[in-house]
């Protein structure tokens, strides 16, 4: 007959181990309300792993009921002297019980008793013929329970490594002792963690030796005369009562008045509704995404949909949700594998690409008067255009709306987003399609069709809720007039792509390879030997052992050769400078030259994808390839731009970027009259700042003064500290603080703005841009000074950087409109932070220049003028 298995968990002990397992990441584990969650997270991982491994039929998590138990009546100092429990741990304990209950497990505590006593009583109460028992704890006290049917698992390292105590293991570890003799060992050696005194100066080794000879504490005292005269014998005689008390304190009560029965502990599975709600509250997105809900648990309602091979007119209405499925991230190259849409109360699904030839489907897509709701408008538009489908009338994008409502969550999985709003009728793509090499359509195509149908219904269900929340947070205009229109402009830019001169890249590859070889030989010559320059370990030996440079930092594998370490050694030896240059050029070669060559498509262009929902400031990011991170401080990096060319010879690349837009936004938001006046008077802002900070006339401002003023100006925007500024300028912290203090004296409006924005952010929990883009900052409530300070700097910077990003987006929308109205052939190709890149016929360039300046300089109205700088040339490099 198959035995039952009873799992008994020492809740306090394991939770404490869990807390310290992730203690180094304490401030990283917080939910949106600022609650620490590291113990909950680690406990969850450990507990679910044990549940999966053991597959128990019965489970209980036992907790201590309080600080005092019946043992304190015997010995007042029992468990005395323990360090104060961290408040960050205590605040998690009530939620730990919620988690355990959601996992479908009973928890229990008993007044005046410890968790050990509950576990001991239940472990010993079951019939060994019917039950195997597994005890999980971080406390070795419970090893005394080990028997042929009771195994005690001790968490050794964090919560990931477990040591299993059986009678055989105990005998091996403690030189032949039995589990019951563990109690005697504690009676003699004591236990510092529980403040059990034991016998003076008898440790574990001596205790084991005595017990091997005499069997028990009582046995030792029965044969005390057999011991030679010694200090140990004197201590045993003096501490006789203390030894007996210590053994009594260490003995688990296996007959405690436990009010739960074994039948109460039958495990029937997780409470999925409670668990999903808990994951949401704790921001445990990874757990939420991996939550595999069994089919027999009706988390998701049965879904009605109709599979379509040939669409008919009645399948399309005057509004509906639309979803297009692709299995790869890059929608410029991934095949469409399914389409679903809704019409009134019905949902239609097809995996037939012949749908794109259907006249009713084509007409429905193209009709701008028919409102369509989607998940990721840009992805949908690009994918359908690739299949020669014109799509108009998209009025709602679930992905964009969810992003604006909470920029802390950048998930692009519809189920994960839906779960934030309490909607659980759709699975994650990973659950349906798998991941990695195994990713693909499920064998059960009905499950695939149902998944698409559920996505459509999720969009329909969530649309009114998200629109209502956007309205309540004053973000509806941001969504409808900036983010959604921009999605279609970005789609056009992505589909257009930018031409790449392949031959120039190939030439660069040769040039950089020769340059790298020359630098490599120079490094080997200085090192006096050849070695693997790309091996941090070998490089560390050369620099810190052979060349005896000062060791700045060590890692688990040896010496650190990270960039920040090498930067500090630059003055020590010329080889360091060469290594840094080598690394920079090697990265340009691999990431940009080789990387771009791989990304060029058949049309001779690269088609980057703009991620609209990633950054918390609203800035766009670029992937496949990333055209925003091409390094331009190094000449070799700038040269990469030589490979970007217009579509044909009589065209040019045109570039325009905003001049000091973030400082202009700061002037507007801070209302500082001096900063505003400098921009209004068209002064060089860094020279103007140098004049005010250093108290000199314009003619007396030196290049170094202007450089320092520039560092202060941009440092202020990012909430820079005296330390950060001192590092940037190579000056003392005192001098840097003096610069900052003087700046605030000369620009009091800026100081007031910074103080007020932080105060307001702490009160409301978020900051906003000029256009109501929000960023939530739970770390403003952190007890950790460094984390709280970073959040304060973020509160200062986000409204500035985010407003600048919003302004550029507004300019892009207006430019796209004006280019069509003016019927210019010029095409917007790229957005790189504050810069816009176009290709334009040579004969149109002056018209374009006038139009771009007009639009960008008047895109929005601030207290100071906006100014854009432009240039053009045969390549992107020439245009800058």
Image (cartoon, helix red, strand yellow):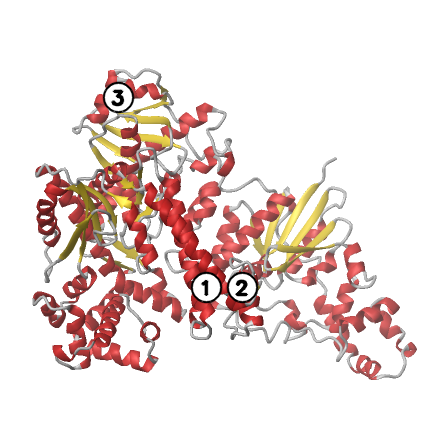
* Residue that label 2 marks: 539
* Residue that label 1 marks: 579
Q: Are marks 1 and 2 in contact (CB under 8 Å)?
A: yes
Q: Quadrant of residue 486?
A: top left
Q: Quadrant of residue 646?
A: top left
At 34% from the left and 69% from the top, the residue drawn is 789
Which of the two marks, 1 or 3, is nearer to us in this view? 1
The tag earlier along the polypeptide, 1 or 3, is 3
* Residue that label 3 marks: 361
Q: Where residue 467 sits in the image (x, y, percent)?
A: 23, 42
Which of the two marks, 3 or 2, is nearer to us in this view? 2
At 77% from the left and 76% from the top, the residue drawn is 202
Q: Nearer the viewer, residue 589 or 94?
A: 589
Residue 58 vertical position relative to residue 43 in the rendered view, above or below? above
The tag earlier along the polypeptide, 1 or 2, is 2
Q: Quadrant of residue 159?
A: bottom right
Q: Where residue 381 sits in the image (x, y, percent)?
A: 27, 33
């Amino acid at each position: 007959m198959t035995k039952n298995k009873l799992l008994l968990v020492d809740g306090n002990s394991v939770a404490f181990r869990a807390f310290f397992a992730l203690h180094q990441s304490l401030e990283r584990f917080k939910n949106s309300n600022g609650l620490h969650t590291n113990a909950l997270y680690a406990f969850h991982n450990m507990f679910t792993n044990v549940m999966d491994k053991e597959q128990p039929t019965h489970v209980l998590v036992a907790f201590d009921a309080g600080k005092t138990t019946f043992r304190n009546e015997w010995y007042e100092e029992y468990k005395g002297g323990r360090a104060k429990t961290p408040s960050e741990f205590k605040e998690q304990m009530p939620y730990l019980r919620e988690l355990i209950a959601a996992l479908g497990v009973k928890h229990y505590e008993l007044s005046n008793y410890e968790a050990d006593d509950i576990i001991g009583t239940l472990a010993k109460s079951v019939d060994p013929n019917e039950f195997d028992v597994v005890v999980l704890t971080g406390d070795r006290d419970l090893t005394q329970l080990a028997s042929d049917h009771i195994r005690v698992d001790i968490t050794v390292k964090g919560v990931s490594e477990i040591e299993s105590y059986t009678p055989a293991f105990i005998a091996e570890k403690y030189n032949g002792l039995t589990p019951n003799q563990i109690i005697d060992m504690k009676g003699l050696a004591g236990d510092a963690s529980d403040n059990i005194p034991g016998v003076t100066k008898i440790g574990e080794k001596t205790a084991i030796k005595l017990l091997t000879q005499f069997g028990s504490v009582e046995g030792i005292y029965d044969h005390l005369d057999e011991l030679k005269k010694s200090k140990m014998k004197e201590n045993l005689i003096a501490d006789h009562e203390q030894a007996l008390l210590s053994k009594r304190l260490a003995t688990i009560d296996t007959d405690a008045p436990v009010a739960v029965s074994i039948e109460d502990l039958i495990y029937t599975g997780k409470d999925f509704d409670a668990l999903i709600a808990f994951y949401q509250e704790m921001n445990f997105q990874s757990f939420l995404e991996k939550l595999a809900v069994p089919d027999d648990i009706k988390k998701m309602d049965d879904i009605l949909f109709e599979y379509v091979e040939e669409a008919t007119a009645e399948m399309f209405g005057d509004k509906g949700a639309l979803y297009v499925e692709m299995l790869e991230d890059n929608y410029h190259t991934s095949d469409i594998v399914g389409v679903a849409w809704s019409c009134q109360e019905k949902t239609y699904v097809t995996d037939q690409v012949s749908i794109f030839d259907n006249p009713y489907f084509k007409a429905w897509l193209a009709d701008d008067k028919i409102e369509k709701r989607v998940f990721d408008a840009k992805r949908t538009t690009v994918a359908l255009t690739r299949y020669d489908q014109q799509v108009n009338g998209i009025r709602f994008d679930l992905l964009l709306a969810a992003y604006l409502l909470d920029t802390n969550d950048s998930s692009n999985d519809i189920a994960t987003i839906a779960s934030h709003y309490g909607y659980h009728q759709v699975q994650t793509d990973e659950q349906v399609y798998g991941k990695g090499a195994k990713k693909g359509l499920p064998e059960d195509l009905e499950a695939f069709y149902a998944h698409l149908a559920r996505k459509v219904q999720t969009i329909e269900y969530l649309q009114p809720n998200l629109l209502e929340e956007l309205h309540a947070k004053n973000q509806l205009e941001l969504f409808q007039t900036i983010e959604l229109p921009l999605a279609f402009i970005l789609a056009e830019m992505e589909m257009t792509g930018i031409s790449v001169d392949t031959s120039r890249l190939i030439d660069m590859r040769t040039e950089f390879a020769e340059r790298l070889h020359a630098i490599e030989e120079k490094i080997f010559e200085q090192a006096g030997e050849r070695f693997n320059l790309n091996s941090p370990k070998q490089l560390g030996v050369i620099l810190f052992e052979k060349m005896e440079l000062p060791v700045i930092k060590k890692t688990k594998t040896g010496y650190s050769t990270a960039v920040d370490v090498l930067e500090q050694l630059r003055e020590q030896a010329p080889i360091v400078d060469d290594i840094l240059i080598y690394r920079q050029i090697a990265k340009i070669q691999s990431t940009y030259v080789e990387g771009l060559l791989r990304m060029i498509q058949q049309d001779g262009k690269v088609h980057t994808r703009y991620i609209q929902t990633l950054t918390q400031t609203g800035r766009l990011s670029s992937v496949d390839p990333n055209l925003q991170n091409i390094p331009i401080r190094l000449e070799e990096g700038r040269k990469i731009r030589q490979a970007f060319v217009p579509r044909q010879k009589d065209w040019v690349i045109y570039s325009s970027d905003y001049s000091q837009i973030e400082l202009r936004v700061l002037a507007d938001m801070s209302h500082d009259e001096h900063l505003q006046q400098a921009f209004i008077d068209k002064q060089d802002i860094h020279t103007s700042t140098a004049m005010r900070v250093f108290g000199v006339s314009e003619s007396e401002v030196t290049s170094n003064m202007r450089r320092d003023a520039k560092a202060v100006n941009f440092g202020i925007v990012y909430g820079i500290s005296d330390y950060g500024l001192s590092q940037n300028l190579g000056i003392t912290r005192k001098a840097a603080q003096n610069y900052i203090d003087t700046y605030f004296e000369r620009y009091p409006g800026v100081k007031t703005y910074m103080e007020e924005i932080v105060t307001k952010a702490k009160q409301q929990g978020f900051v906003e841009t000029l256009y109501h883009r929000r960023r939530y900052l739970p770390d403003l409530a952190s007890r950790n000074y460094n984390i709280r300070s970073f959040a304060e700097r973020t509160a200062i910077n986000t409204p500035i950087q985010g407003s600048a990003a919003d302004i550029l987006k507004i300019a892009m929308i207006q430019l796209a409109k004006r280019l069509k109205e003016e019927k210019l052939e010029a095409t917007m190709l790229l957005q790189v932070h504050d810069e816009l890149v176009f290709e334009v016929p040579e004969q149109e360039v002056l018209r374009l220049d006038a139009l771009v300046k007009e639009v960008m300089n008047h895109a929005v109205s601030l207290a100071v003028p906006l100014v854009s700088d432009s240039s053009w040339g045969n390549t992107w490099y020439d245009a800058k």
